[in-house]
Image (tube, grey):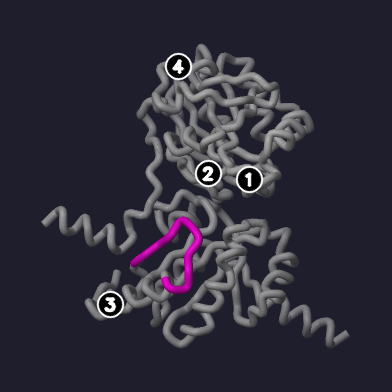
Amino acid sequence: MFGTLLLALLATDLVVEVSPTQLEEEIRRSKTPVVVNVWATWCRPCVEEFPEVLEFARKHQSEAKVMLVSADFPSRKKLVEKFLKEQGVAFRTYLKQGSDEAFVATLSPQWSGALPATFVFAPGGKLVVWFERKVTRAELEDALKRSKDETEKGGKR
Amino acid sequence: MKARAFSVLLVLGLWSTAWALKPGESLPETAATIKMRGVDGKEVTLKDLMGAKGLLVIFSCNHCPWVKAWQARMVALGNEYSQKGVGVVAVNSNDTEAYPDDDMDHMVAQAKEHGYRFPYVMDATSEVARAFGATRTPEAFLFDAQGKLVYHGAIDDNAEKPQEVKKTYLADALAALVTGKPVPVAETKALGCSIKFRQAK
């Protein structure tokens, strides 16, 4: 009984629902650059780029906050958790909740809403680079470097 | 200096934004005459499909969960307004070699299963989607009788839960169009599957 409960708690922890307002707050508050990757279990290009994003996240966990935000419908949360476990993800990830329009506007008003999409913010919340397509680890590393340069220039919002 | 600022933006990737047709702009001439085969086997162009009141083009496909979620609402609107003088067409621009679920056989089955009473056609080169700057499915473009874009965007504001929809964007735009009123909201966004473009040959 306790074991089941504990497992349930752990499972809940792996995927946390995030509203556009909460997402904005997380991005703004971070002391390190933030990489937001919007994906879905049903999105093939997202699944294809996933290992690259994950490798980046693991290698740069001290320098960047990587937020994997699933855009799966909330009713599919179990499938999201299953996928993340299969991929060996052990850190907290997110499930998009609430208005699509506010979500898109929070990340970039220029984004059309198509998946996959990845956004790199400098500390303070300024959007430095974004992609409306699959990304590679090398591209993310380059983006991280740029967001650090941005920080040194005092490029805060 | 301006040019330099622009190139900096380019380098920073802030201009990676996909261009899309803006409200007030015309139905792209290049796309309007491209022949597309429909699920009934006939070839049509957007020009042929323009109705007395306007034209609704919805970029769609078979495999995408957002399309599936919105499908019943999309079909209801398409069926209703194709009877009210609006030309209606669903356009599938996806690369069917990479996504076999989006091929013609599956299109035929989908149109039949969901009772499409408007054409569902294949944009066999993805050029129609490129000419519109369409990026995702489903994505609606509504033109008036003069071929000016009056609405671009989502079907409504809640894909997953029809009962929780608060803003019926496309329905409102269609209702305004056929009664000669200004469209209340001309541009909206929603999440969607990226269009799986064929590589230009």
Q: Which residues are magenta?
A: A128-138
Question: Disc number at residue B145?
Answer: 4
The residues bearing labels 2 and 4 have C-alpha atoms spaced at a distance of 31 Å
Q: Badge 3 sits on which subunit?
A: A
Element marked by disc 1: loop
- Callout 3 crowding tier (Cα within 10 Å): few <14, some 14–19, many ≥20: some
Q: Same chain, marks 2 and 4?
A: yes
Front-most of B102 and A20? B102
Q: Badge 2 sits on which subunit?
A: B
Q: Is residue B166 left or right of residue A125?
A: right
Q: Is residue A135 above or below residue A56?
A: above
The answer to whether the residue labelled 1 contacts the one labelled 2, judged by CB atoms less than 8 Å apart, is: yes
Element marked by disc 4: loop
The residues bearing labels 3 and 2 have C-alpha atoms spaced at a distance of 37 Å
The residues bearing labels 1 and 2 have C-alpha atoms spaced at a distance of 9 Å
Where does label 1 land, which residue?
B97
Occupied quadrant, residue A13: bottom right
The residues bearing labels 4 and 1 have C-alpha atoms spaced at a distance of 36 Å
**Residue displayed at 60% across by 38% down:** B60
Residue B188 magenta: no
As drawn, which residue projects farthest toward the right? A1
Q: Which of the two discs, 1 and 3, sits closer to the camera?
A: 1
- Callout 2 crowding tier (Cα within 10 Å): few <14, some 14–19, many ≥20: some
